[in-house]
Image (cartoon, rainbow, N blue to C red):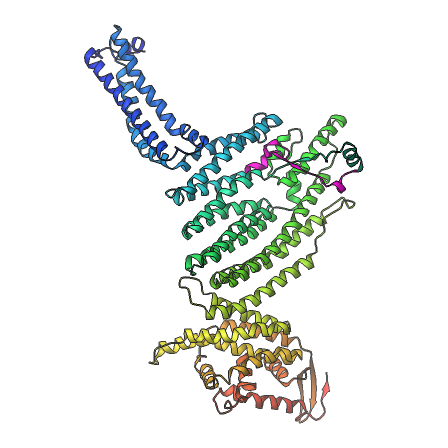
Amino acid sequence: MELLLVPFVATRWPIPESSSYVSWLGSLAQIGGVFIALYFTAVTAAAGAIYATVPNNIRDLMTRERVGNIYVRYLTQATFIPLCLIALNLAGFPPLRLALPILIILAGTGIIAFAALGRRAFDLFDPTRLAGSLFGELGRWLDQVSAGGFRWKDPEFQNHAHRQSNSIVDGLLTLADLAATHENLESGPLLEFSVQILALLTEYQRRKLRIPTDSYWFGQKHEHPSWYMTDDSTTSMAHQTGTTLTPNFVRQYHWFEDRVETIVVKCFDVNIRRARVDNVGELLSAAGTYVDALARSGDLNRATALVERVREKWERHCSENGAPESPARVGIADVLGSLQIQVLVAYRSAIEQLSPESTANRIQSVHWSRVESLYSKRFPSAELRLLEWVAPRLEAENEIEGKIRTPNWYIQDLIARAQMEAMVENLNSIVERGSELQSWSDRLVKAGLVWQSAAVLARELEYLNKLAAHKGFLAARFEALNAAKHLSDLQWPKFDKTEWVERAGKLRTRLNRSMALHILLLKDSEAVTGVPDYLGQFIHETAENLVDVLLKNETSEVQVLFAPLLRGTLALFERMKPSDPNFDVWTEQKLQIAAAPVIDLLELSGFSKLLAELHGEEKLWTPIATAWDSLFPKNPRMLPWLAAVTAGGLPRFQIPHRGLVRTNWSMRVQRELNQLPRRTFLGRGSGLFTREEIDHPSPLVRYCAKYEFHDGWEIFAALYLAKQPGGENLRWGHSVTNLTEALERDQEDDTGGDDENPEEL
């Protein structure tokens, strides 16, 4: 290059002096040698501190560290070239002018890169930072066994990729064990490493769909058959030879997840034992992405199994250590409960794409002449197995007939059957997981962890509400698949929608009872600052649930819900009422807000009286009256206090606090009253007129249905509170004091009044 380029490019470029040239080259070589020595010094220090007692596969990771190896090779080259040029000069060749800019660039790049590499050398003290090379190797093996990879159909190459990847997983597990046993690595480094593992698992869920389901990548294990479920010829041969039955070989479709998930669980265990709740929360957040990917692929059982493994470790830790509840610990229980909701929502999103039309379009786009096209349509594993069974038969058909004669609707029916089987399993799993949340809450209560139990119940409430919102769509999707079938003689899966809905309804009833009982537990427990207002939420939900059971005439639930609601509401008022003795505008507003739940309670009590007479079911009213009766002897000032609440808690000329909630209750009750049969009469008294009569024996029901009475608390005050000892002398309001007279007038009007000869129209 010197002889060919320099004379033509730079004719006036002088040749450097030999002594200066050699001295400059020697300086460059020394710099390179120093940098190499410094790098290996750092490597030796890390090896002595961390890698002295580790297995060989971890030490190999350090030697295969990609960035360091590339830099050392580069620096070796940049050091060796000046030595070669010095040797050439000593051999009699003149100094090379072109070496000056080239070596300046090489040496300058090496010096600048060493600054970054020097900082990176400290990463060698963290073995988990070396996992990048393992991730890269694993990705290359996945590419090889995926459709279109090098010899991807060859069983020998598949088996080799499995062995190599299994060795890589061994290295990942060793890294996790090493990080978990070093105090300086078990916090941040192990957490970061586990987050990377979760990202790897998430990506693997997408890439494994491009691998044939019968590939040796998935490995195989022995499965011993049952003697009495094996054909006679096989068992007879085994009997005559005195041998056992030959085991079957089955693919381990989840071998990778089974092994790698243990790293995530180990990280949870370490951080839970060390009480690093912040790390647990961060890891749970990262686990949500992986759980979402599993649910979208239809593997709900695996997604929930991972959540349950982590939940068991958290539950065991809380029970054994007896640590006081804190916002962080309650937050962990809340996040664990939210993961189950994420499974439901993700599966709902996946089902949206599961329709006969979308399946038909994907089948239509498959090129049966190219088998690898099966693995580019993102068919789930169960559907892939069917398509892999169909593909060679279509190929044989094409060779014999000259074209494929099997219609697409036949293949679509086979896939639809697999889809329906998976849906039945997953829909049953969805209901079972709601029961698991309830059971976990019960165990937390036994352990004295009331606030964590409340967090779990709040998440179960959200879970069941989402299930109620999605259950119609999920069942309709199953019916759509069933309606689109063509092969009527094929054994199709059955799904009992009614039984499934009843199971979900029983879960909701059980949850309603648990929330009501938790009102008492939270009321008597020491408050934990920084957590959601579970007491207020459960009081509100129990009040709404009480309206539901009253309207549905479910007498067995009234007592279970009302007794805790009464005690919890009164305790809530004591916490919310103003403590300032000076009564001003702000104090009045605070009092109205604090009195709102008490007025809700009176409203519900009045509606229970009304609905008990509407349905002719005294058991709707008896538990509520009994609860109030047991309260007044212990609190003689309760009646005057309730009278003051009704007078000061309902402001005039404005919508009261929680007024919209009570209005909604009134409208629901009124809709029930509007369904009563009505009769219209023509009167012939002093003139002609018409009169409408409600066909019901109760004067209260007839009056409320006729005049659209909305305030339940007035019914309760008029028919119960005002009749208590001392209640008749209290001021309950104009409408309350006159309600009894209005009911009596209603009865008198029904006897005829001025209408001497009424005729029914």
Tell me: 500 left or right of 277.
Answer: right
Above-or-below relation of 680 to 510: below
Instruction: Name the residue rendered at 34%, 78% in the picture.
Output: 580
Image label count: 0
Figure quadrant of residue 710 = bottom right
Q: Position of residue 577 (x, y in %)?
A: 40, 76
Q: Can you name the residue that lies furthest to the top here?
A: 92
- Residue 711 seen in this snapshot: no
Picture quadrant where residue 436 is located: bottom right
Closer to us: 499 or 170: 170
Q: Quadrant of the C terminus?
A: bottom right
Up/down of 297 relative to 23, above or below: below
Which percent across, then down, holds residue 680? 69, 83
Q: Nearer the viewer, residue 465 or 267?
A: 267
Residue 702 in the figure: left or right of residue 659: right
Q: Position of residue 161 (x, y in %)?
A: 56, 29
Residue toward you, 512 or 96: 512
Q: State whether residue 662 is above or below residue 345.
A: below
Left/right placement of residue 117 relative to residue 563 reads left
State whether residue 134 appears in this view: yes
- At 49% across and 86% down in the image, what residue appears? 732
Name the foreground residue: 166 vs 563. 166
Residue occupying image coordinates x 21% and y 12%: 16
Instruction: Please identify the quadrant where the N terminus is shown.
Output: top left
Q: Quadrant of residue 166?
A: top right
* Image location (x, y in percent) of residue 130: 41, 34
599 magenta-colored: no
Q: Is residue 225 magenta?
A: yes
Q: Which residues are magenta?
A: 206-231
